[in-house]
Amino acid sequence: ATHEYEILDDIECGVMLHGSEVKSIRNGKVSIDEAFARIRHGELWLVGCHINEYPQANVQNHEPLRTRKLLLHKRELAKFAEKAEERGHTLIPLDVHFSEGKVKVKLAIARGRKVHDKREKLKQADADREMRQALRRGK
């Protein structure tokens, strides 16, 4: 995500999930590659996040690509929404992890990079890597 986007701000929020979704996430069967967040009717929603079905859940299984509600305090959401509404900004998930037994999503406000910005970032990373290697060899 950091190659495609310039990260401006981030926040950690909770997710409303079914039990079988939590089990799948514990097994590492979650993909946020195509996911993004959207603010609809004053609520924050995660769209396009794929959580595989849990094989032992039988009939109680969940839909893998369903839209999931993200949980934030109203003040946090208002502050975050204000920044996200600016032109060219989007909300993308950076990470899905467990914190104190609860599933959390690290959500970021990001601006898409242009092709020349991506190239510039790669050149800068190469230069930094070469400098670190030169310093290491010099020791």
Image (cartoon, rainbow, N blue to C red):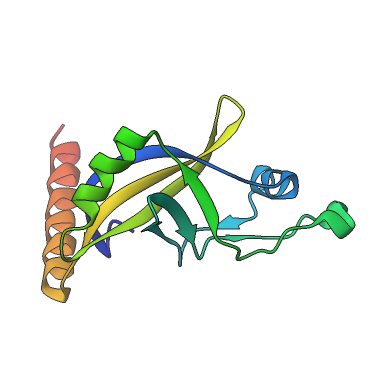
> Dividing the image into 4 quarters, which one contains the N terminus?
bottom left
The number of numbered badges drawn on the structure is 0
**Residue at the far top in the pictured view:** 100
- x then y, percent, for residue 139: 16, 31
Camera-side residue of 36 and 114: 36
The residue drawn where x is 62% and y is 28% is 101
Camera-side residue of 87 and 53: 87
**98 lies above or below 100:** below
The residue drawn where x is 18% and y is 55% is 125
- Is 42 positioned to the left or the right of 80 in the image? right
**105 lies above or below 52:** above
Occupied quadrant, residue 68: bottom right
The residue drawn where x is 42% and y is 51% is 44
Camera-side residue of 56 and 77: 77
- x then y, percent, for residue 52: 68, 60
The residue drawn where x is 68% and y is 44% is 22
- Is 56 positioned to the left or the right of 71 in the image? right
- Is 101 positioned to the left or the right of 115 in the image? right
- x then y, percent, for residue 115: 17, 75
Occupied quadrant, residue 100: top right
**131 lies above or below 101:** below
- x then y, percent, for residue 136: 19, 38
- Is 3 positioned to the left or the right of 47 in the image? left
Occupied quadrant, residue 51: bottom right
